[in-house]
Image (cartoon, rainbow, N blue to C red):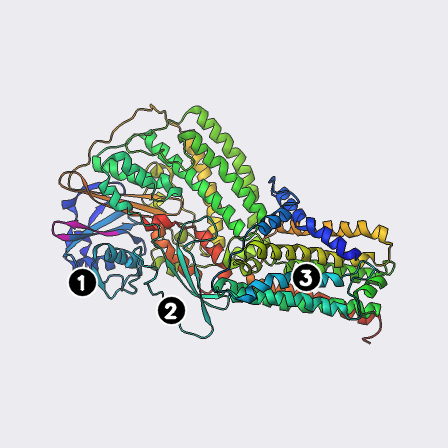
């Protein structure tokens, strides 16, 4: 329950911080931290327009997308305090709950019959597919090291006093952060603020969504960011008391948002055909972590 | 064949009597055109038809960059005649023939592709098609997501790769050339010229003013030419800077987009301070310089340029050495030298592909004769070349502007008239807008009234360069290719 509340709070300001960092580094006044939230409220007040070519799937998709992320968030623990859903192997459930949402988002986009959205859907599917091994390999290496198989017990067993835990936690933090960027279609894989349909990935998929539906998709994006950042925070707060854990949790959330904002301010986006390479690098790093753990724990030789 | 002796050689900005233009029969006309176009130093600057008695007169002007003159020859054909296409043997003429076909109903037999230039029926026209299970089509426009002009782009893709791009323009056709004839007051005509392409208003109005003055036999004074040259270089700097920002924006490089976006402002604001319009509208008028350039303006501009230069050089150095930007620009959207030559590309599109085509050097006008502009030429033909060309041209313009300011003439602020155009005359003016070569051409009748006015914006040729550049690229790189050319829709559509 703690984690759910904290993630919901973080989601309120996560994208706002990214926006602030970008505005400040561009020397602009820029919108306030609460602007993403105001955008959603504005969208919720609007009506929804459906194109004639769309069917029920298109209407269903945004809700399923949001629900899938909410369910995934329920699995996220707060350090050694388990999430509302917790069982052995819950991280597999977590990953496929997210995948279900993405699947609906993709078929919702295909339902419009637009060539733009078809392109976006195909790109999003490809990148999600490439990102999946990275998540499982890094979770696998954590499970291998700790000997546990649920989020809560893995995180509780990560002890900052052991250098091995630290090393793995840092690698995992990097992978989760980049996964958050890939899954949310941020730079350097996608550019969230471009208006050019041909280069978009996620934005072009939701081009036909409007009003409440679009609001739900935005909310889902904010939640996903906060969720990944919560996973990163969990790597470091498993063994400390909740009272200290909460400030660390928020510090990690803010730090993640600032890093994403700085990255979007000072680098250019990748060429589309470099993206698969980049995302696959994550899986390779995770694979190295797996071998490292096996080597250290004597399971390899 | 040595037909060259029959052909009229004139220089940029000059007037001749219509009777002096040699009129060939179509067979010889076509053969002459093909023979002349065989030389790489020559390209066709305009080819148009206008009604002359009961027939149609075709006039072709071919610029010779080596000899620094323009070759003019004509041909009378009957209305509705069917002619052998010259484009079948010389691709650079294909759009001219399509235009003449569309405007005057002449048929060109053997033309490679009778695609509409401007007269386009959205629901009737059948786009180029390719068969294949794995191919898909993507149509973009005419309404775009950004605040830009309308144009339709039809891609045929294999997955992410573009096999073919067809560009259909014409949505902005306003009939500028016809209006030039219908509007009888000079001020109306100047305003029309300024509005051919709003971002190139100085160069288009300079071309119009030059044509008008030469028709009237008026020689503008030194300070008028000085003001036009300065305004043209400021226009070049402002547009190139804006484009650099837009290129950075398209690769999502926020720092570059923010810095270049900010740097464009002082240049256009200076233009407003000088003539009251940020795009330089109103600054060029036939026969006189309406806005005096004062010592105070000079000091203001020198200060603006110093501040501009510091940030511009720092930012340009950064993007030219920043891997994440370079990886997007390098080897993206290549136009090969042979392609640029065959389609008759001009301006940036040509200069980036190793074809040196700069009117300021080859057919100097205004004060460019004395400025000895050394055209910037790049050989790689990719987006990076077009980015670096802009950076280098801005540096060059900075030097030109400072040189001009050092030799500032005095302005008397007097309003003058060029007089009235001579009867039965032909005049042509080439200017180098920031996109490339602009050509304005006028013919007067027996009463001294305009009977034909032909405008050619560089975009007329260069849209084809864009279509060729994106072949084999990823469709996601199209926006950056498009932005690197930044062609004009309204300049093409007229």
Residue corresponding to mark 3:
A69
Q: Of the residues under marks 2 and 1, which one precedes in the sequence?
A: 1
Inspect this view and state whether residue A265 appears.
Answer: no
Q: Quadrant of the C terminus of chain A?
A: bottom right
Residue corresponding to mark 1:
B82
Residue B180 placement (x, y as % from top left): 25, 42
- Secondary-structure class at tag 2: loop
Few, some or many residues within 10 Å of mark 1 (<14, 14–19, 20+): some
What residue sits 43% from the left and 33% below the top?
B271
Magenta stretch prevailing secondary structure:
strand
Q: Nearer the viewer, mark 2 or mark 3?
A: 3
Residue B477 placement (x, y as % from top left): 50, 59
Read off the chain for label 3. Answer: A
Residue corresponding to mark 2:
B129
Read off the chain for label 1. Answer: B
Residue B316 placement (x, y as % from top left): 54, 45
Describe residue A106's horizontal placement relative to residue B140 as left or right: right
Read off the chain for label 2. Answer: B
What residue sits 17% from the left and 59% below the top?
B80
Residue A50 placement (x, y as % from top left): 51, 59
Closer to us: B78 or B73: B78
**Mark 2–mark 3 distance (CA, rounded to whole Å):** 42 Å
Q: Is residue B486 magenta?
A: no
Q: Is residue B304 placed above or below A246 in the rendered structure?
A: above
Q: Nearer the viewer, mark 2 or mark 1?
A: 2
Few, some or many residues within 10 Å of mark 2 (<14, 14–19, 20+): few
- Secondary-structure class at tag 1: strand
Instruction: Write the start and end of the magenta stretch as one range.
Output: B47-55
């Amino acid at each position: 329950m703690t984690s759910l509340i904290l993630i919901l709070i973080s989601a309120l300001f996560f994208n706002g911080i990214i926006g602030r960092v970008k505005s400040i580094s561009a020397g602009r006044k820029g919108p306030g931290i609460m602007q993403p939230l105001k955008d959603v409220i504005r969208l919720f007040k609007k009506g929804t327009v459906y194109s004639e070519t769309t069917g029920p799937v298109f209407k269903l998709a945004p809700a399923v997308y949001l629900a899938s992320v909410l369910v995934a968030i329920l699995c996220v623990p707060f350090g050694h305090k388990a999430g509302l859903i917790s069982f052995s192997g819950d991280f597999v459930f977590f990953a496929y709950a997210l995948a279900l949402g993405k699947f609906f988002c993709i078929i919702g986009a295909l339902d419009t019959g637009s060539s733009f959205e078809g392109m976006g859907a195909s790109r999003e599917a490809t990148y999600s597919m490439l990102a999946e091994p990275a998540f499982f390999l890094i979770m696998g290496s954590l499970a291998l090291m700790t000997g546990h198989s649920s989020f809560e017990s893995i995180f509780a067993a990560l002890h900052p006093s052991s250098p091995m835990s630290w090393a793995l936690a840092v690698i995992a933090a990097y992978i989760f952060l980049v996964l958050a960027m890939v899954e949310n279609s941020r730079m350097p894989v996608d550019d969230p603020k471009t208006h050019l349909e041909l280069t978009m990935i996620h934005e072009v998929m939701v081009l036909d969504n409007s009003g409440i539906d679009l609001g739900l998709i935005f909310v889902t994006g904010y939640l996903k960011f906060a969720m990944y950042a919560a996973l990163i925070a969990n790597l470091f707060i498993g063994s400390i008391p909740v009272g200290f854990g909460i400030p660390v949790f928020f510090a990690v959330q803010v730090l993640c948002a600032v890093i994403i904002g700085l990255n979007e301010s000072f680098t250019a986006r990748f060429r589309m055909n470099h993206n698969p390479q980049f995302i696959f690098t994550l899986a390779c790093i995770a694979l190295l972590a797996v071998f490292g753990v096996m080597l250290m724990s004597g399971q390899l030789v | 064949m040595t037909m060259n002796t029959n052909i009229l050689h004139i220089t940029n900005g000059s007037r001749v009597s219509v009777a002096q233009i040699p009129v060939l029969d179509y067979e010889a006309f076509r053969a002459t055109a093909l023979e002349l176009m065989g030389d790489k130093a020559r390209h066709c600057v305009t080819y148009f038809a206008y009604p002359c008695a009961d027939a149609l007169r075709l006039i072709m002007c071919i610029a010779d960059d080596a000899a620094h003159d323009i070759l003019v020859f004509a041909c009378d054909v009957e209305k509705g005649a069917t002619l052998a296409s010259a484009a079948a043997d010389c691709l650079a003429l294909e759009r001219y023939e399509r235009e003449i076909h569309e405007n005057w109903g002449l048929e060109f037999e053997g033309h490679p592709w009778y695609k509409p230039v401007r007269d386009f029926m959205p629901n009737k026209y059948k786009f180029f098609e390719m068969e294949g299970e794995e191919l898909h089509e993507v149509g973009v426009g005419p309404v775009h997501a950004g605040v830009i002009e309308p144009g339709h782009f039809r891609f045929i893709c294999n997955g992410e790769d573009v096999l073919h791009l067809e560009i259909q323009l014409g949505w902005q056709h306003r009939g500028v050339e016809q209006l030039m004839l219908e509007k009888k007051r000079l001020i109306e005509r100047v305003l029309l010229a300024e509005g051919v392409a709003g971002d190139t208003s100085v160069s288009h109005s300079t071309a119009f003013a030059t044509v008008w003055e030469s028709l009237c036999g008026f020689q503008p004074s030194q300070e008028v030419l000085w003001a036009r040259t300065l305004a043209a270089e400021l226009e070049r700097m402002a547009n190139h800077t804006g484009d650099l920002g837009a290129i950075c924006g398209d690769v999502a490089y926020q720092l570059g987009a923010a810095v270049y976006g900010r740097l464009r402002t002082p240049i256009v604001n200076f233009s407003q301070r000088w003539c009251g319009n940020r795009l330089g509208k109103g600054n060029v008028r036939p026969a006189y310089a309406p806005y005096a350039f004062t010592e105070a303006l000079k000091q203001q501009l020198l200060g603006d340029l110093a501040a501009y230069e510091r940030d511009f050089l720092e930012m340009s150095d950064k993007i030219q050495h920043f891997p994440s930007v370079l990886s997007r620009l390098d080897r993206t959207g290549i136009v090969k030298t042979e392609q640029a030559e065959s389609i008759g590309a001009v301006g940036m599109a040509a200069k980036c592909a190793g074809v040196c085509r700069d009117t300021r050097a080859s057919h100097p006008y205004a004060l460019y004769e004395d400025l000895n502009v050394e055209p910037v030429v790049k050989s790689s033909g990719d987006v990076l070349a077009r980015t670096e060309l802009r950076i280098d041209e801005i540096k060059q313009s900075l030097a030109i502007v400072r040189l001009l300011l050092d030799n500032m003439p005095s302005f008397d602020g007097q309003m003058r008239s060029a007089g009235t155009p001579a009867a039965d005359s032909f005049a042509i003016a080439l200017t180098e807008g920031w996109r490339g070569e602009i050509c304005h051409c006028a013919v007067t009748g027996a009463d001294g009234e305009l009977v034909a006015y032909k405008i050619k914006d560089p975009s007329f040729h260069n849209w084809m360069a864009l279509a060729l550049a994106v072949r084999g690229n990823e469709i996601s790189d199209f926006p950056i290719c498009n932005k690197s050319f930044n062609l004009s829709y309204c300049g093409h559509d007229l």
